[in-house]
Amino acid sequence: MSVKLCVRAFIFCVSVTVAAIAQEFSAPEPQTGTITGTVVDVNDDPIPGANVVLDASSLRDHTRVVTNYNGFFVLDHLRPGISYHVTISASGFAGWISPEVTLKPSQYLELAGIRLGIVEAVTTVHAVVSTEEIATQQVNVEEHQRVLGFIPNFYAVYDRHPVPLTSKLKFKLALKTTIDPITFLGSALVAGVDQAADKYDFQQGAKGYAQRFGASYANGLTDIMVGGAILPSILHQDPRFFYQGTAAKKSRILHAISYPIICRGDNGHLQPNYSRLGGFLASGAIANAYYPESNRGPGLVFSTALVDLGANMANGLLQEFVLRRLTPAAKEQRSSEPGN
């Protein structure tokens, strides 16, 4: 009887031990947290290019980032339950060190009161990273955005803290779009549809198809160059679509369909999208130079503009609700949204 009891006790102990080990291995790791903040000077002006260093007792938790042109930074994928210190420095400014920070699982913590004083006896201040350099890096990312890996999606902005584009970058985006092979393919498809419907008074046959192809490509070219580069450079407006993503569905729908009507200025404020609307009208007006004489006139101008307007609204809805999931490069971008 005592042997049986001993065997049972032994089996029970082994079972408990195995269960404990299994639970330890199967227990999910706690979700990581995020620390954000905005670095400003004594006048509450943002400090771009400030060095932000995260230190912890573990060497693997040592991280360094640089603030963007708004002075904003993000430290993400941080393990909970560990004591962190954030140290911030910038050329010409006194350093700043945070109190000890310990994150909870999935916590999104914004450090407040990060204000750097000016160091005495410093006569020059050099920013580590200029706004133009940050904008160039963001455009380089956007130029690799392709829906399903091959359809250009260069004008969508998924970065939560974008910087304004220089005129050079606006023209770079427009040129890359106009010479992309998919742009030519799209014009070829539109020309085929127009030819099948006998739209406009071009002749039929190969010559008529070539004329329709040229007209379709020229429409897109003038719209992109005028509405996406020339007018945005003159009027200091941003031609890109800024993905919202986190608001209520109604707000996102309004944001999407207002894309060709409301834009973000280079100063960061919303304003009437004179650039995009001007591009629509310019495209229609210039079309009078190469469409058949019987199709020319105000009707061609406004019909072309209305088609472009509707296409841009539809594109805004697709951008806000569909295309990000189909754009591999967008999925790889880090987001500063809470919980990501």
Image (spheres, rainbow, N blue to C red):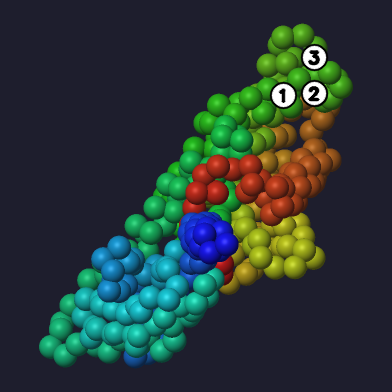
Point out residue 326 in the picture as x, y percentages from the top left corner: 63, 42
Q: Residue at x 35, y 85 (%)?
A: 100
Task: Indicate which disc, 3 or 1, sits on the residue closer to the N terminus.
Answer: 1
Badge 3: few (under 14), some or many (20 or more) residues near its Cα, within 10 Å? Answer: some
Q: Which residue is mark 3?
A: 203
Spatial CA distance of label 3 from label 1 is 17 Å
Mark in front: 3 vs 1: 1
- Position of 322 relative to 54 (above/below): above
Q: Which residue is mark 1?
A: 189
Q: Quadrant of the C terminus?
A: bottom right
Task: Indicate which disc, 2 or 3, sits on the residue closer to the N terminus.
Answer: 2
Q: From where the camera sits, is residue 50 visible? A: no
Q: From where the camera sits, is residue 96 visible? A: yes
In the figure, is residue 212 to the left or right of 152? Answer: right
Q: Considering the numbered disc 2 on the image, is that residue within a helix, a strand or a loop?
A: helix
- Position of 269 relative to 323 (above/below): below
Point out residue 4 in the picture as x, y percentages from the top left corner: 56, 59
Q: Depth check: 294 or 39 in front?
A: 39
Point out residue 149 in the picture as x, y percentages from the top left corner: 56, 34
Q: Which residue is mark 2?
A: 193
Q: Are marks 1 and 2 in contact (CB under 8 Å)?
A: yes
Q: Depth check: 44 or 149 in front?
A: 149
